[in-house]
Amino acid sequence: MSLAAPTTPLQIRPYEAGDWPAVWALLEPVFRAGETFPHDPAISEAEAQLAWVEQSQAVMVAVDPAGAVVGTYYLRPNSLALGAHVANAGYVVAENCRRQGIGSRLCQHSLQAARRLGFRAMQFNLVVSTNTVSSDIRNWSSGDTKSGPLCEAVAPAC
């Protein structure tokens, strides 16, 4: 399955505190579904803000020409101490904006941002096998390889 060519004009910029309501509107249905992130589906808004924003080194938002937040990602160290040079990222795109190449653009942006922040590698800890959108863009254009599906990493995803 191929993704549509990225045709949507998009600005990717640093998250600002005033973006939170729009970011939460993107995150809440994704977290509640319990299919793509390992967060408790009953996560509170405050817990989500802590997890997405406060515990991240960088958070970005994708904004369409009308000013609407249509996607977001975070960057943080994947591990502590000796593993802190490896970045981890999470991405969410508005449901009505999926399959327009926005996720791929966020990923490419995050790889560049991670380098600027001093990270030397990026590790995606899990892409749930039922997350067909991410599965389609898992390797983007970087030539990365996957080690295999984690069918029980997020119960009951498989």
Image (cartoon, rainbow, N blue to C red):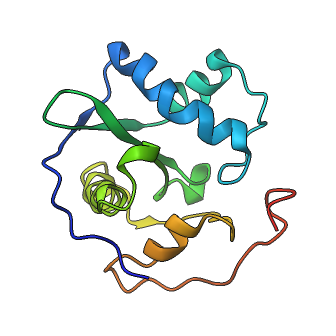
Percent x, y for residue 33? 71, 43
Q: Is residue 30 above or below residue 42?
A: below
Quarter of the figure that contains the C terminus: bottom right
**Closest to the observer, 56 or 15:** 15
**Closest to the observer, 137 or 108:** 137
The quadrant in which residue 47 appears is top right
Tell me if 54 is positioned left or right of 120 in this view: right
Residue drawn at point x = 17 percent, y = 52 percent: 8
Q: Is residue 99 above or below residue 76?
A: below
Q: Is residue 133 above or below residue 53?
A: below
Residue drawn at point x = 43 percent, y = 37 percent: 57
Extreme residue toward the front, this view: 96
Residue drawn at point x = 49 percent, y = 36 percent: 56
- Residue 74 seen in the figure: no
Quarter of the figure that contains the N terminus: bottom left
Percent x, y for residue 77? 51, 49
Percent x, y for residue 3? 34, 73
Tell me if 93 is positioned left or right of 8 in this view: right
Percent x, y for residue 71? 37, 42
- Residue 68 seen in the figure: yes
Residue drawn at point x = 61 percent, y = 41 percent: 30
The quadrant in which residue 98 appears is bottom left
Q: How many marks?
A: 0
**Closest to the observer, 147 or 127:** 127
